[in-house]
Image: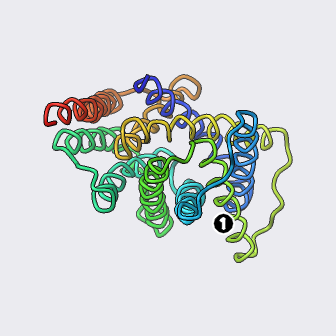
Amino acid sequence: MRALLFVATAVLWGSSAIVTGQQAISGAPEVSVGYRMALVSLAMFGWSLARGQSLGVRQIDRPWVVLQGVSFFGLAFITFYHATALIPSGIAALILSTSSLFAALVGWLFLSVPITLRMLAGIVVGIIGLAVIAAPQFTALSSGAGTVAGAGLALAAAACTGCGTVVAMRNQRAGIPISVLMSWAALCGALFSFALALIGQASFHVDVSLAYLAGLAYLAIIASCVTFFMYFSLVHRIGAASASYTLALVPVVALLLSALFENLRIDASVLSGGCAVLLGNILVLSSQAGAPARAKQAS
């Protein structure tokens, strides 16, 4: 079940890359993210009510829910949208995959989550594989200010994603149901995004074409509600660092889809880098799978 959730999360997020790029150039990213998260929140509130779940959150947990919403559902998406407007989405996704490193570090610092050598090796091997895949794109990029800013924004998105993932882990440990947690956190992310748009005097007008609205619905329901639910389920099952590693597979999925639908040529760098990513994935998952057994033996 964990492997299925892991693969499905990576595939759905990877398949949304092209749609995300279109949304980023169709209006202010803060506004697009705000609308997207507002739809996510409404859908998850409806799902929670349909299942008869209480929407109440303890007062002690509310600041953490807000923090998750601002970091994961707000800042991470806003900065990533801006990044894709400045650098190729594959490069942005590559940088975003380092969120697993941020999640591991923050989890170790604040939640005392151990980092095993096997997990660290898997993350490093996976990111090396992604670097091999993206190397030809890096050599084609200019070193202008836009490229540097785009890379910095993508790295900021990775940091926010990693931090948000660890906060989500804390919130789930507090017993907040995933659907209820997503409902409130996405609402906080939407309000935060709209507030930034107002402060920046961004236009709330967006493209009302069928393509934009269909893309928004896809990103909100499939690439957000469904995928976030699976992602935070992974956080609960395998830990924050390993769950964040699904993002390491997103560029690979995007490249494979480009080969199928955009005639992208699969060369040696793509094949070798893809194998490294898969090896890193196996190392990370096997590290988590062995943890319960080691704990049981120690007890």
Horizontal and vertical percent for residue 150?
A: 49, 61
Q: Say whether residue 254 is visible.
A: yes
**Which is nearer the eye, 67 or 292?**
292
Horizontal and vertical percent for residue 91?
A: 44, 49
Horizontal and vertical percent for residue 294?
A: 17, 33
Horizontal and vertical percent for residue 182?
A: 61, 47
Q: Which residue bears the numbered disc 1?
A: 192
Which quadrant holds the N terminus? Answer: top left
Q: Say whether residue 80 is visible.
A: no
Going by the image, does 278 lie left or right of 11? Answer: left
Question: What residue occupies the far left of the structure in this picture?
Answer: 298
Which quadrant holds the C terminus? Answer: top left
Image quarter of residue 235: top left
Coloration mode: rainbow
**Which is nearer the eye, 268 or 130?**
130
Please report the residue visible at 14 percent of the width from the left and 31 percent of the height from the top: 297
Please report the residue visible at 50 percent of the width from the left and 34 percent of the height from the top: 254
Going by the image, does 25 lie left or right of 11? Answer: right
Please report the residue visible at 67 percent of the width from the left and 64 percent of the height from the top: 193
> Mark 1 packing: few (<14 Cα in 10 Å), some, or many (20+)?
many
Question: Where 292 falls versus 45 (above or below)?
Answer: above
Badge 1 amino acid: Phe
**Which is nearer the eye, 166 or 156?**
166
Going by the image, does 147 lie left or right of 194? Answer: left
Image quarter of residue 119: top left
Please report the residue visible at 33 percent of the width from the left and 57 percent of the height from the top: 111
Question: Where 234 falls versus 108 (above or below)?
Answer: above
Question: Where 220 falls versus 38 (above or below)?
Answer: above
Element at label 1: helix
